[in-house]
Amino acid sequence: MSIKIGIYGYGNLGRGVECAVHQNKDMELVGVFSRRSPDAVKTVTGAPVFHIDKALEMTNEIDVMILCGGSATDLPVQTPALAKLFNVIDSFDTHAKIPEHFAAVNAAAEEAGKVAIISVGWDPGLFSLNRLYAGAVLSDGADYTFWGKGVSQGHSDAIRRIEGVQDAKQYTVPVESALEAVRSGKNPELTTREKHTRECFVVAEEGADKARIEAEIKNMPNYFADYDTTVTFITQEELNRDHSGIPHGGFVIRSGRTGANLEHNHIIEYSLKLDSNPEFTASVLAAYARAAYRLNHEGAKGCKTVLDIPPAYLSAKSGETLRKELL
Amino acid sequence: MSIKIGIYGYGNLGRGVECAVHQNKDMELVGVFSRRSPDAVKTVTGAPVFHIDKALEMTNEIDVMILCGGSATDLPVQTPALAKLFNVIDSFDTHAKIPEHFAAVNAAAEEAGKVAIISVGWDPGLFSLNRLYAGAVLSDGADYTFWGKGVSQGHSDAIRRIEGVQDAKQYTVPVESALEAVRSGKNPELTTREKHTRECFVVAEEGADKARIEAEIKNMPNYFADYDTTVTFITQEELNRDHSGIPHGGFVIRSGRTGANLEHNHIIEYSLKLDSNPEFTASVLAAYARAAYRLNHEGAKGCKTVLDIPPAYLSAKSGETLRKELL
């Protein structure tokens, strides 16, 4: 019997979940729920499309609803609302607002007897897990998280808002020498500038003042001013040809010490190199949908995060098989 | 209130646990249990020493007993026996016998209402966890585990048994080009010889035939014959000076694909670089002792592995704090 999945919201992440569900033999995609008219939405694998209002009538047909909206305005409303009807998974990633989101979703899921798992993905998500494991093992140490090389949607958008910019793509790039210093066990204190650089590829509108655009980017507070930023002007054709992907990745490193006199150093490093950020995030969501389904079948309810889920619940394999093959 | 820990068996691993407990403010070391006469054992931090027979009388004084014996003959007997009396943690690492060990420990712990967590450490242990997470997320992919650079006790012992060898240390070394091929996403099929090399530092007895010793090492079946092995003869002084540590480490890498046509590749890499293999393993044991204690307090019983334990149980911090700080 397969796990019946719904996808709520159909952008890059929703399309990624559609592909991920397709890859998992124990899952079945019931359909995609969109605000748009179902006729106007064409799915990657031919999955049925429903208007979001239809979800209300389909509570018995869907085991887990995977929410693929944005963290700014969609998920704060949608996750608590849908947790009253379904087991749900979201990728809420506004770090500062997680406690508030958790409380709202927990109240809804508790009351409905459903399981909700929030902030699933790679950061928050797999990176959070690695910070937890590494910190629990090496209690005396320091954590470092680096992001990239990868596309930052927020920074790309910020550049596009500058007058005279037609299109842009921004890459966050970890500084190799900083990574090496961390790996050496030196426990360096690193400034923002020392950890990451920002590479911007910009298409200027015809006749625009490139020098002004470059200066505006480099001096933009919060986004670029604290970083060493490079700006390269290219044509729209070049941008489309060379920068159409959505790669990302990063590193979580903990450096810690043990021994009677803390004389031994240890490095735990976790890294991701992703060709497609949304498809990888979607694959994490699919694995946690399996966990939500199984937990709810066992009677669990309420809001959880990746930190609460026993790892074995993510796998389609039995405990016996996992012990034999993976342990 | 702190978690009261006992250490059962006092070699390198037991000393490592002693130091690890010392580093965790929510734990307290009740004592070390040894087969030797307590007077003959000097502990690193001055912890009390008891003869192992005394453990029977101390079931109310110890929350979790951490077993630090060997997998060959100690743990198959000790873990089931002690799981009748205590919550227990062991580092049983004979992969092929884990299902059998699990069954024996589970029966004992279930009956006694205790929690036992077996095969805790880094492989089995943290590496197993990473194989599970990565495989659950990237269902279409391949796993690679590399060990080293690090000291293999078994291989060092095998060299020491050769006639004319006074002392020896063997390092297992991952082949950099194989690591790079895996990281590139090529999903290579790698032979034993292509994955690791073996570096041997040997002290020959006075007048021993070094050419014969080198040939015996390189042709030893199972241990060395399938590898590119280098043998370097050094003096006992050099061995003591340059090779007295017990470093280890390794890499777990999963390469997998997503997308409608599996067109996107992803690499998940986890690695450890450890100055002291036993102290790091001990630190993992201590973190899981915390989980065993908390699970048992909630009414859980029976045998578990790292794959079953919710990550948050490893940390001394509350769920609320973890969500705020780590998620």
Image (cartoon, coloured by chain):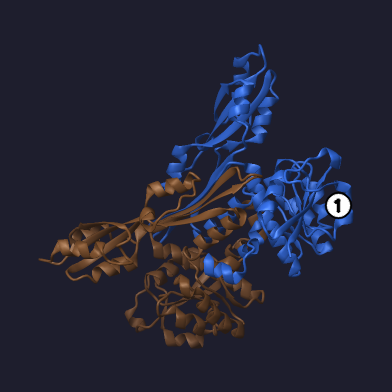
Chain colours: A brown, B blue
Three-letter residue code for mark 1 = Ala
In front of the other: A265 or A74: A265
Among the 4 quarters of the image, the one containing residue A113: bottom right
Report whether A28 appears left or right of B126: left
Q: How many marks?
A: 1
Query: Which residue sits at x=57%, y=55%?
Result: A134
Res. B125 in view: yes
Name the secondary structure under disc 1.
helix
Find the residue positioned furthest to the top: B207
In front of the other: B185 or A83: A83
Among the 4 quarters of the image, the one containing residue A213: bottom left
Res. A92 in view: no
Report whether A232 appears left or right of B70: left
Report whether B309 appears left or right of A218: right
Query: Which residue sits at x=75%, y=68%?
Result: B297
Rendering coords of residue B316 (x, y %): 64, 63
> Few, some or many C-alpha atoms within 10 Å of disc 1 (few <14, some 14-19, many ≥20)?
many
Quadrant where the image shows the N terminus of chain B:
bottom right
Among the 4 quarters of the image, the one containing residue A165: bottom left
Query: Which residue sits at x=79%, y=42%?
Result: B73
In front of the other: B194 or B124: B124
Rendering coords of residue A27 (x, y %): 53, 69
Q: Which residue is mark 1?
A: B55
Q: Which chain is mark 1 on?
A: B
Query: Which residue sits at x=55%, y=38%?
Result: B149
Rendering coords of residue A188 (x, y %): 46, 50
